[in-house]
Image (cartoon, grey):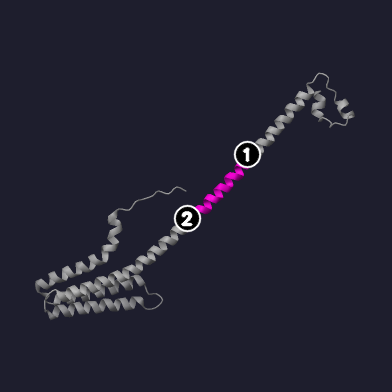
């Protein structure tokens, strides 16, 4: 019933929200480093990045086709294709305006895709919490009913024992009276004593 409450660290809360911007910024930084080391206006490097991007996109298409398609693999392949294309353009171009424009577009797209995932994850988490809350309420209700039933049975048993003790004490006290005559009680129409008490008398 009592569940441990675990407070999440603020970094654990912020990290998933910052992940898309960190990923696109990392690609931009690496592409610009690559640009400064000879990739600027290099046709061979541009062709290589284009081929890698197309290969990753083809892998994403293959992973998403048919019943056996895996959306996680397809999404990863398409994300890799976009990152490779972005890195190729940012590494090939001279100046920062075009790479920064592509960075902003890529970051906005990454946040758009991540927002869908976050909404789905939040919806599933809320549904799970609601389900667990319902189960806890149901379990607590069953426990309350069982507690009431057990208490009632105990009270009924106590009442029966107290009644039996009182009856036994009354019969013993009546049989101990000095002028007690069971025959006179029967003649008067009073209830007959049990055989055990009559014998005792």
The residue at the far right in this view is: 187
45 vs 13, nearest the viewer: 13
Which residue is at 66% across, 38% downward? Answer: 157
Magenta span: 131-154
- In the image, residue 132 above or below residue 92: above
- In the image, residue 28 above or below residue 173: below
Which residue is at 44% across, 58% downward? Answer: 129
12 vs 69, nearest the viewer: 12
Marker disc for residue 183:
none
Which residue is at 12% across, 79% downward? Answer: 42
Total marks drawn? Answer: 2
Q: Quadrant of residue 101?
A: bottom left
The quarter of the image holding the C terminus is top right
Name the residue that disc number 2 marks: 133
Q: Quadrant of residue 127?
A: bottom left
Q: Is residue 87 magenta?
A: no
Name the residue that disc number 1 marks: 154
């Amino acid at each position: 019933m009592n569940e441990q409450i675990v407070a999440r660290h603020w970094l654990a809360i912020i990290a998933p929200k910052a992940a898309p911007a960190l990923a696109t910024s990392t690609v931009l930084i690496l592409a610009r480093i690559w640009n400064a080391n000879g990739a600027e206006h290099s046709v061979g490097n541009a062709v290589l990045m284009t081929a890698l991007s197309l290969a990753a996109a083809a892998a994403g298409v293959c992973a998403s086709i048919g019943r056996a398609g895996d959306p996680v693999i397809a999404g990863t392949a398409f994300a890799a294709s976009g990152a490779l294309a972005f890195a190729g353009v940012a590494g090939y171009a001279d100046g920062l305006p075009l790479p920064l424009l592509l960075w902003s577009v890529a970051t906005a797209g990454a946040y758009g895709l991540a927002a869908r995932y976050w909404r789905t994850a939040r919806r599933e988490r809320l549904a799970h919490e609601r389900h667990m809350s319902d189960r806890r309420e149901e379990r607590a209700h069953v426990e309350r009913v069982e507690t009431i039933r057990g208490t009632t049975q105990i009270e009924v048993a106590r009442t029966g024992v107290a009644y039996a003790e009182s009856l036994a004490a009354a019969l013993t006290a009546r049989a101990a009276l000095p002028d007690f005559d069971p025959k006179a009680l029967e003649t008067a129409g009073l209830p007959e004593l049990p055989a055990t008490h009559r014998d005792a008398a």
